[in-house]
């Protein structure tokens, strides 16, 4: 086979440059004919994992949904979780009620779905009924009569004590006077008249002593009488309280008993109602009519007193009345309080106060019995949320604690609500990188999230997946009210999807980017007055999307055309090859050429990477240069040392160079310089190389080819221009129709090579040559010329004194 035949065999045909979707593949005319249901395309691995994770009831089998943004992971996860939740039973309601034994620890009460709201209403009605019944009872004539009779009996006992005291006083010659300040004893004469101070002074000393003795004796009797009166009064109060308690218990027993019967199936509710009845009886004073203050206070807040009936309320924190299945909670802002709940406070007189009615549930309590879906990035960026979630999942209970309890150095008095038992399936949605970091660094994550649903970015292109893709497009149009797509437009969308996947046999599952084209194509069809989106509308949307973002690309192309950036696309020069790189500008990537040059001369330093010398080379690029240097040694220095000085650089590059996709280009430039063989400047090169001389595939092949084609078109197509790519990248080609048409017309070419030798033949038009049995290359070949030049450089180096390496002379001086 001749040299020209070899080159033609390496040149790709126009049909190999892109995959074209035949609209006849589809049986419909427009997507309006398709069933408008949402489907997932090509995510069998993730779908099966998610189905398993959602149906497993064992603890610690929570799910991590991973995959790049835009693959439909969130949309499908929400849809699937909702479908599974709809088949599950509705979980119970949860209430917090007052704890009469430990008021700072409110009790959590579980009730059947919808019963929580009923119980709350029953308790509100019960309190109102008790207030009315007790107040009517305590103000009734019957109770007042009993009260009067009771008080009268004790009053009679007190009067008897006073009469006995008065009789004793008369016996001792005194009279008793009861005043607001106490009891006073006054001496009296034989006829019962009070003795005045003058009369007392006129008495003899013996008479005064006698009166004093009898007064002291009477004082003891007065003290005994006061003790008896106080005892009777205390008995009267106790008897009156017992009368009221008995009456209140009788009046409240029936309403409380009725509510207790209605909740007989819930022992905790029954026990709570028993304690409530005892508390009502104990605090029956609160049910009496309260008198308004005689003097109004200056501030309404000062006049407000604590509601004594607040403790009888029911705080319904989880109400599942309106659910038809298990709950599915998608928390978009998983702060600590939104996730785990909180105890709120209100300000009163400069202080913060709270009670059990101010307990608020979080997403965990709301999702108990169902599913909680979270974006992992959101929960990791909210302080304490991640640790709180893990603690709840480990313990199996949702404990409401304010952050201050965990961070405060000084303990404060607050509520400690009883934890609610937790039965929830947590689904985290995040990127593969976060999954790897959590799996390696967080041992709790490995124990809790054992199911990984991995969404892929690509799906194999088959007739079935193409049909599913068409149905997905129809569903999007129907859901968003877009114009229907004809089958030719659907074919163009699939071609765009293959371009995103960078593979002729695959379609992209990054539906976020595909949906953008669907939306914009419908908008362009509307602007053009088309009722149905055609292929031209899809192409218009793609072109406009590029045009909005390619300002920098156009500017670089203009600089090349103005020779401000030196790129030759015609002629032949040794040691100079056009390399291709990709610039990523946010949502837009484009390729552009860069001149790569090589110089070789006498010396022993080997291959010098100028970018590395100036600290502008990334690690991968430096590795690529090191590989090509060792390729030279392995191929041309088997029988002699590799003695040369060579330099490689990207001309007019002022930022860091990274990646190894230009390592083959650098090698071609160096071999061309060594061989003195000029390289066709119209051929740009991309591809990495290994130590065996094999060309390896690279990324961004479409952008690189199209970027170079645009430069050649701007400078003038000659028919000798094109791009040389790794043969493995042929399947990745999804080039624009313009490039394909140029290849069909013979004005632009794509070559696919597998080895360095094949690439040299394309670039120089000379045979590369294979070493014979003696290790020598045939004369006139590229490899023979390279080998001969390396031998010449080595011989020239030997004619001169050994050139000391940097630092060698200094070390020798030290040794001497």
Image (tube, rainbow, N blue to C red):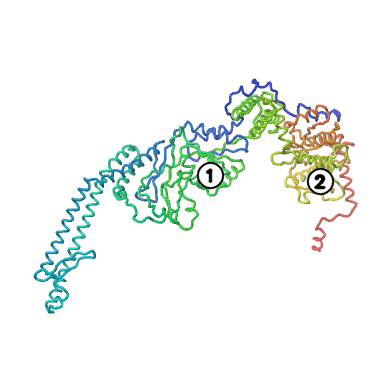
Q: Nearer the viewer, mark 1 or mark 2?
A: 1
Residue 570 in picture, x, y percent from top left: 87, 36
Task: Choose top left, top right, bottom left or bottom right for residue 129.
Answer: top left
What residue lies at 43% left-to-right and 42% top-to-bottom? 317
Q: Decide: is 171 above or below 807.
A: below
Q: Are marks 1 and 2 in contact (CB under 8 Å)?
A: no
Question: Residue farthest to the bottom?
Answer: 205
Residue 211 in picture, x, y percent from top left: 13, 74
Whole-number angstrom distance, CA of label 1 to CA of label 2: 49 Å
For marks 1 and 2, the one nearer the N-term is: 1
Q: Decide: is 705 above or below 657.
A: above
Task: Choose top left, top right, bottom left or bottom right for residue 210.
Answer: bottom left
Residue designated by label 1: 334
The answer to whether residue 772 is seen in the rendering is no
Left/right of residue 142 with respect to residue 801 in the rendered view: left
Res. 652 mark: 2
Residues 453 and 24: in front is 24
Residues 66 and 671: in front is 66
Q: Which element type, helix, strand or loop, lies under badge 2?
A: loop
Q: Quadrant of the C terminus?
A: bottom right
Say few, some or many: other residues with alpha carbon within 10 Å of mark 2 (under 14 / 14 to 19 / 20 or more). few
The answer to whether residue 322 is seen in the rendering is yes
Residue 571 in picture, x, y percent from top left: 88, 37
């Amino acid at each position: 086979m001749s040299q020209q035949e070899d080159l033609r065999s390496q040149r790709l045909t126009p049909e190999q440059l892109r995959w074209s979707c035949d609209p006849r593949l589809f049986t419909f005319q427009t997507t309006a004919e398709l069933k408008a249901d949402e489907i997932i395309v090509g995510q069998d691995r993730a779908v099966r994992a998610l189905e398993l994770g959602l149906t497993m009831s064992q603890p610690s089998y929570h799910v991590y949904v991973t995959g790049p943004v835009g693959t439909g992971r969130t949309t499908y996860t929400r849809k699937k979780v909702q479908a599974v939740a709809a088949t599950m039973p509705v979980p119970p309601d949860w209430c917090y009620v007052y704890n009469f034994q430990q008021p700072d620890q409110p009790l959590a009460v579980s009730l059947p779905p919808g019963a929580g709201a009923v119980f709350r209403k029953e308790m509100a009605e019960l309190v109102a009924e008790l207030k009315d019944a007790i107040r009517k009872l305590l103000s009734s004539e019957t109770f007042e009569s009993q009260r009067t009779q009771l008080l009268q009996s004790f009053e009679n006992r007190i009067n008897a004590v006073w009469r006995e005291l008065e009789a004793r006083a008369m016996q001792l010659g005194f009279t008793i006077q009861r005043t607001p300040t106490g009891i006073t004893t006054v001496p009296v004469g034989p006829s019962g008249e009070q003795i005045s101070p003058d009369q007392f002074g006129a008495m003899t000393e013996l008479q005064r002593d006698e009166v004093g003795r009898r007064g002291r004796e009477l004082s003891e009797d007065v003290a005994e009488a006061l003790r008896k009166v106080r005892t009777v009064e205390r008995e009267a109060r106790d008897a009156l309280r017992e009368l009221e308690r008995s009456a209140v218990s009788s009046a409240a027993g029936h309403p409380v008993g009725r509510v207790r019967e209605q909740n007989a199936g819930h022992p905790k509710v029954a026990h709570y109602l028993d304690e409530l009845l005892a508390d009502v009886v104990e605090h029956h004073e609160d049910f009496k009519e309260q008198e308004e203050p005689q003097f109004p206070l200056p501030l309404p807040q000062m006049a407000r007193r604590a509601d004594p009936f607040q403790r009888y309320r029911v705080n319904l924190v989880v109400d599942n009345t309106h659910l038809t299945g298990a709950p599915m909670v998608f928390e978009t802002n998983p702060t600590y309080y939104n996730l785990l709940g909180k105890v709120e406070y209100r300000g009163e007189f400069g202080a913060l106060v709270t009670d059990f009615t101010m307990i608020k549930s979080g997403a965990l309590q709301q999702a108990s019995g169902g599913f909680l879906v979270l974006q992992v990035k959101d929960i990791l960026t909210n302080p304490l949320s991640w640790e709180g979630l893990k603690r709840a999942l480990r313990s199996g209970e949702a404990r409401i604690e304010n952050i201050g309890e965990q961070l405060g150095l000084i303990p404060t008095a607050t509520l400690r609500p009883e934890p609610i038992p937790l039965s929830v399936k947590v689904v985290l949605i995040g990127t593969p990188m976060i999954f790897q970091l959590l799996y390696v660094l967080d041992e709790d994550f490995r124990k809790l999230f054992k199911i990984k649903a991995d969404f892929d970015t690509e799906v194999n292109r088959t007739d079935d997946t193409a049909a599913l893709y068409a149905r997905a497009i129809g569903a999007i149009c129907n859901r968003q009210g877009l114009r229907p797509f004809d089958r030719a437009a659907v074919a163009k969308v699939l071609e765009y999807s293959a371009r995103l996947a960078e593979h002729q046999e695959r379609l992209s599952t990054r539906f976020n980017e595909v949906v953008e084209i669907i939306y914009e194509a419908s908008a362009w069809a509307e602007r053009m007055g088309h009722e149905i989106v055609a292929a031209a509308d899809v192409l218009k949307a793609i072109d406009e999307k590029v045009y909005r973002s390619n300002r920098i690309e156009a500017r670089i192309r203009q600089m090349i055309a103005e020779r401000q950036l030196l790129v030759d696309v015609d002629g032949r020069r040794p040691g100079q090859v056009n390399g291709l790189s990709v610039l990523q500008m946010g949502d837009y990537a484009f390729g552009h050429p860069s001149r790569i040059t090589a110089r070789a001369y006498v010396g022993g330093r080997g291959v010098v990477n100028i970018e590395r010398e100036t600290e502008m080379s990334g690690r991968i690029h430096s590795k690529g240069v090191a590989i090509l240097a060792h390729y030279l040694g392995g191929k041309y220095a088997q029988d002699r040392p590799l003695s040369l000085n060579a330099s490689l650089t990207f001309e007019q590059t002022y930022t860091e160079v990274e990646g190894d996709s230009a390592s083959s280009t650098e090698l071609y430039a160096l071999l061309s310089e060594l061989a003195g063989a000029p390289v066709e400047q119209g051929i740009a090169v991309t591809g990495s190389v290994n130590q065996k001389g094999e060309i390896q595939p690279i990324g961004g092949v479409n952008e690189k080819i199209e970027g170079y084609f645009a430069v050649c078109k701007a400078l003038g197509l000659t028919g000798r221009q094109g791009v040389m790519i790794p043969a493995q990248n042929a399947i990745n080609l999804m080039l624009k129709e313009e490039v394909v048409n140029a290849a069909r017309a013979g004005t632009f070419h794509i070559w696919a090579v597998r080895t360095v030798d094949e690439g040299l033949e394309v670039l120089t038009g000379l045979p590369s040559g294979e070493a014979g049995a003696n290790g020598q290359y045939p004369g006139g070949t590229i490899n023979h010329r390279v080998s001969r030049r390396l031998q010449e450089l080595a011989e020239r180096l030997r004619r001169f004194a050994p050139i000391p390496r940097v630092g060698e002379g200094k070390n020798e001086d030290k040794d001497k």
